[in-house]
Image: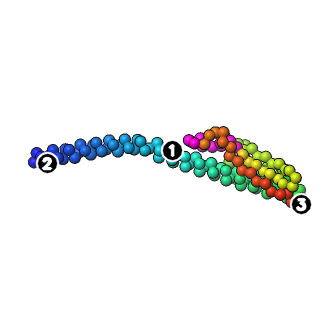
Amino acid sequence: MRGLHIIRSRRAASRLNSRGTEVLELALIMPILLSLVFGTIEFGYFFYLQHNLQAAAREGARAGVPLGATTGDATAKATAFLQNANLNPTSYSISVTSSGNNLTCTVQASWGNVGTHLLFIPNTKIVRGSAVMRKEGT
């Protein structure tokens, strides 16, 4: 009977030692898992912003190309798009230029002003959307 008690206590001690290694393994793996999760969130938000800025620039250019439209119409349309996307238009710069018979609308901001600032993307990174369309009647 005594021998059986010794075997049981050795098994219990073995389980205690393996629990310690499980905690150590978790502590070693957790930074990698967290950086993967937060990196995925940060890059996902970056691409979400880039997609919305591209769409705002396209809408702005589309509003500026009809005959008689002004660059102010294009700026107003891009601003309205940003507001509808729940993005603060004051954080972004909208520029509309006309050269020859092309109109270019660019919407941009630095990541430091509009980003999540989690891990990887530097604050100096520029998020930009741009669209070029031919003016009507030219």
Q: Quadrant of residue 27?
A: top left
Q: Which residue is mark 1?
A: 35
Report how many numbered discs are placed on residues in the image. 3
Q: Are marks 3 and 2 in contact (CB under 8 Å)?
A: no
Q: Residues within 10 Å of mark 1 (few under 14, many from 20)?
A: some
Pick whichever of labels 3 and 2 is earlier in the sequence.
2
Q: Which residue is mark 2?
A: 4
Pick whichever of labels 3 and 1 is earlier in the sequence.
1
Q: Position of residue 38 (x, y in %)?
A: 53, 46
Describe the element under mark 3 as helix, strand or loop: loop
Where are the magenta residues, as a range? Answer: 109-120
Identity, as a three-letter code, of the amino acid under mark 3: Gly
Using the numbered discs, state the Cα–Cα distance from disc 3 to disc 2 in whole angstroms: 97 Å
The answer to whether 41 appears left or right of 97 in the picture is: left
Q: Which coloring applies here?
A: rainbow
Using the numbered discs, state the Cα–Cα distance from disc 3 to disc 1 in whole angstroms: 53 Å
Q: Residues within 10 Å of mark 3 (few under 14, many from 20)?
A: few
Describe the element under mark 1 as helix, strand or loop: helix
The answer to whether 36 appears left or right of 99 in the picture is: left
In the figure, 60 relative to 20: above or below? below
Residue 90 seen by the camera: yes
Q: Give the residue drawn at x 41%, y 42%.
A: 28
Q: Which residue is mark 3?
A: 137
Q: Quadrant of the C terminus?
A: bottom right
